[in-house]
Amino acid sequence: GVPGIMDVYRAGNITIANAPGTGIADDKAIYSYMPEIVEFYTGRKAILGNIPTWRCSEPDSLKYVLEHISELVIKEVHGSGGYGMLVGPAATKKECEAFAKKLQAKPSNYIAQPTLALSTCPILTEKGLSPRHVDLRPYVLVSDRIQIV
């Protein structure tokens, strides 16, 4: 990070677009609670479904994940960018066994999800158009007078 940025922020001299603390929404363990969070704050069930997510910190979930490790995607709770994860269907038996040991050593560091068919978008490459995976993350800002998507 930028040295001293938090001092300048606390003094009110700058605004940070992604203010400190907003990263909690990126936490994969928090994601697994979203249906309950939505219902708690709105009094209604979430409109969109959640991807099934097993919290490895829960004994029954850990047992399931270990039994199905070759079928699941296992991610570090605080990880990003595809680091520190296992894509079971693409992993070797040896890789699955090594990852199972990591899971058992620190289960609270991981969640697991089924693999998903990701959308693609045509991208121009040196050889012409080629499909690439898309990860669209919309952000919405709302106030009494404006809506920005």
Image (cartoon, rainbow, N blue to C red):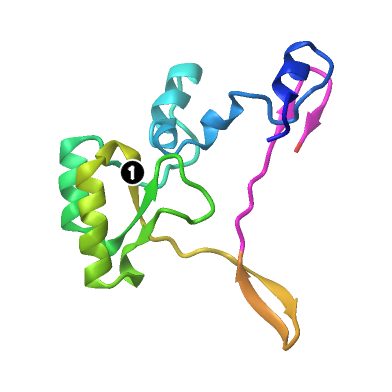
Q: Could you say which quadrant of the image residue 94 lies in? A: bottom left
In this rendering, position of residue 90 left or right of residue 66: right
Pinpoint residue 146: horizontal percent, then vertical percent: 82, 25
- Whether residue 53 appears in this view of the structure is no
Pinpoint residue 114: horizontal percent, then vertical percent: 34, 56
Assess whether residue 135 is covered by the magenta stretch: yes
Residue lying furthest bottom in this view? 127
- Which residue is depicted at the point 78% across and 18% down? 8
Assess whether residue 128 is covered by the magenta stretch: no
Q: Quadrant of the C terminus?
A: top right
- Whether residue 135 appears in this view of the structure is yes
- Of 145 and 19, nearer the camera is 19
Pinpoint residue 87: horizontal percent, then vertical percent: 37, 63
Q: Helix, strand or loop at disc 1? A: strand
- Which residue is depicted at the point 15% across and 56% down? 67
Magenta-drawn stretch, dominant element (helix, strand or loop): loop
- Which residue is depicted at the point 58% across and 23% down? 21
In this rendering, position of residue 124 left or right of residue 84: right
Q: Identify the magenta region.
A: 134-148
In this rendering, position of residue 144 left or right of residue 62: right
- Which residue is depicted at the point 39% across and 31% down? 33
Q: Quadrant of the N terminus?
A: top right
Q: Amino acid at mark 1?
A: Tyr
Number of numbered discs present? 1
Reply above or below: 64 against 94: above
- Of 137 and 20, nearer the camera is 20
Q: Residues within 10 Å of mark 1 (few under 14, many from 20)?
A: many
**Residue with the mark numbered 1:** 110
Residue lying furthest top in this view? 11
Q: Could you say which quadrant of the image residue 105 lies in? A: top left
